[in-house]
């Protein structure tokens, strides 16, 4: 299926008659990407579902005011990232734990059978990713899984390209070390 | 720098990570994504409904026209109240002058209360008092014992004195006379001779004669 261009979506959205159609096109194009982006951060499907809905409601409400100084794609990613980080911070405050402890809880949820569908090395990779600091985890996910450019990640997070490269480099080394030690053990 | 160049840089440093398939191995409920579009549409629609101006609420006619005048009159009333309340109460004359002095007296100029050192709080005083008490008690007991003995002798003397005081004088004089006469002897001539012969030798007698 041919992907609709962002410009066409924005054009249709600007017209009230075709607004719903434009929104449907936007959902078709981005809902799975946004879902997995959020899911990699919060792990739980139900939490992800809530956050996906909140993200796209915000998109619906603010798309009319969207300025084309950034890409539509990165703009939606930014909303989804902020929603996810806000959710994790609330979870931290609610449980009165540090963000590291929240990551620990998320790692524990990996062991639940109805969440995880991978082999041992995949589990090890996911556990290794959860050891990363929150922002570093976001950068790693967008670079490694979503294959985004540093420029696009910079638009999403508002961080310089140099800082992003350094952060990703450190994350890669750390995860490689964990995976390599795991191979030695087995 | 394209993505490939960016990837090559880190893939060389992390071959294990680079060799893994880039998947997210989490389960998703069946038909989730098929239903997600309609679900999101419904959520967005509902959200739009709740934010429509005046949805479901009735406003009295000409309300907004009179609202401005009502707000202004309310503000004027509040101002009037604040002015009258400031002058509605009386305070005693020179109250505030005295108040400052009173506060200063109790705070800045307050003399610190003298420190009370309780005499009996020190342990050494308590031990000394206990020792004195014991000493006094023992001394008292000892002295009491001595006085009992004295009293007994005194009481014996007193008793004899008392007895003498109780006896009649006439009886005492007769007793004394009898004791005196008991010492006087009235021996006969023969008895004297016998005595002398018994107690003195012939030599003594011849010498004395």
Image (spheres, coloured by chain):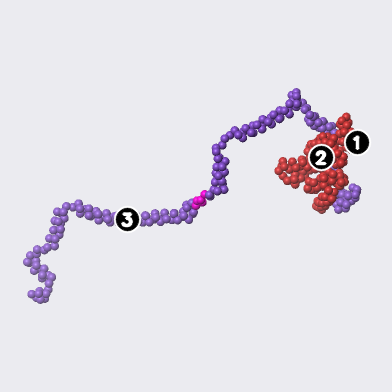
Q: Residue at x 91, y 36 (%)?
A: A8
- Judging from the image, what is the letter of the chain drawn in red? A
Q: Quadrant of residue B129?
A: bottom left
Q: Tell which of B25 and B82 is nearer to you.
A: B82
* Left or right of residue B151, residue A136 in this image: right
Comparing labels 3 and 1, the label whose residue is closer to the camera: 1
Q: Position of residue B39 (x, y in %)?
A: 82, 32
SS type, badge 3:
helix
Q: CA distance from mark 2 to mark 1?
A: 21 Å
Question: Residue A8 — which label?
Answer: 1
Give the magenta-colored segment's residue range: B113-117
Q: Are marks 2 and 3 in contact (CB under 8 Å)?
A: no
Q: Is residue B116 part of the magenta span, yes or no?
A: yes
Q: Tell which of B55 and B162 is nearer to you.
A: B55
Task: Check the rendered structure and report the hue given to chain B.
Answer: purple
Q: Residue furthest top?
A: B61
Q: Residue at x 16, y 54 (%)?
A: B169
Question: Residue B9 — which label?
Answer: none
Residue bearing mark 2: A79
Residue bearing mark 3: B147
Q: Are marks 2 and 1 in contact (CB under 8 Å)?
A: no
Q: Residue at x 86, y 44 (%)?
A: A152
Residue under mark 2: which chain is it in?
A: A
Q: Is residue B77 visible?
A: yes
């Amino acid at each position: 299926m041919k992907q609709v261009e962002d410009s066409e979506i924005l054009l249709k959205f600007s017209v009230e008659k075709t607004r719903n159609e434009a929104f449907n096109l936007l959902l078709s194009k981005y809902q799975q990407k946004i879902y997995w982006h959020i899911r990699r951060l919060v792990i739980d499907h139900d939490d992800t579902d809530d956050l996906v809905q909140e993200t796209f409601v915000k998109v619906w409400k603010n798309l009319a005011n969207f300025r084309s100084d950034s890409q539509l794609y990165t703009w939606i990613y930014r909303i989804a990232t902020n929603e996810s980080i806000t959710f994790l911070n609330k979870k931290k405050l609610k449980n009165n734990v540090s963000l590291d402890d929240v990551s620990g809880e998320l790692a524990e949820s990996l062991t639940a059978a109805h969440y995880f569908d991978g082999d041992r090395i995949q589990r090890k990779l996911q556990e290794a990713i959860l050891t990363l600091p929150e922002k570093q985890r976001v950068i790693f996910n967008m670079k490694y899984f979503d294959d985004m450019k540093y420029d696009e990640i910079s638009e999403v997070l508002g961080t310089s390209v140099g800082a992003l490269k350094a952060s990703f480099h450190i994350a890669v080394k750390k995860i490689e070390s964990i995976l390599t030690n795991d191979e030695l053990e087995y | 720098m394209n993505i490939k160049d960016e990837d090559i840089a880190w893939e060389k440093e992390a071959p294990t990570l680079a060799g893994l398939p880039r998947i997210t191995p989490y389960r998703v409920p069946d038909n989730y994504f098929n239903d997600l579009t309609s679900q999101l549409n419904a959520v967005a629609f509902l959200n739009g409904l709740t934010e429509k101006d005046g949805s479901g609420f009735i406003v009295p006619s000409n309300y907004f026209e009179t609202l401005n005048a009502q707000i202004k009159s309310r503000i004027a009333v509040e101002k009037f109240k604040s002015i009258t309340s400031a002058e509605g109460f009386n305070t005693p004359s020179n109250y505030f002058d005295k108040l400052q002095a009173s506060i200063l007296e109790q705070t800045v100029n307050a003399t610190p209360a003298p420190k009370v050192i309780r005499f009996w709080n020190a342990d050494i005083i308590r031990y000394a008092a206990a020792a004195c008490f014991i000493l006094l008690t023992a001394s008292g007991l000892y002295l009491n014992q001595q006085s009992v003995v004295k009293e007994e002798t005194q009481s014996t003397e007193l008793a004899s004195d008392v007895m003498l005081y109780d006896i009649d004088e006439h009886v005492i004089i007769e007793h004394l006379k009898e004791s005196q006469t008991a010492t006087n002897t009235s021996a006969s001539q023969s008895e004297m001779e016998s005595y002398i012969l018994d107690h003195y030798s012939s030599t003594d007698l011849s010498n004395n004669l």
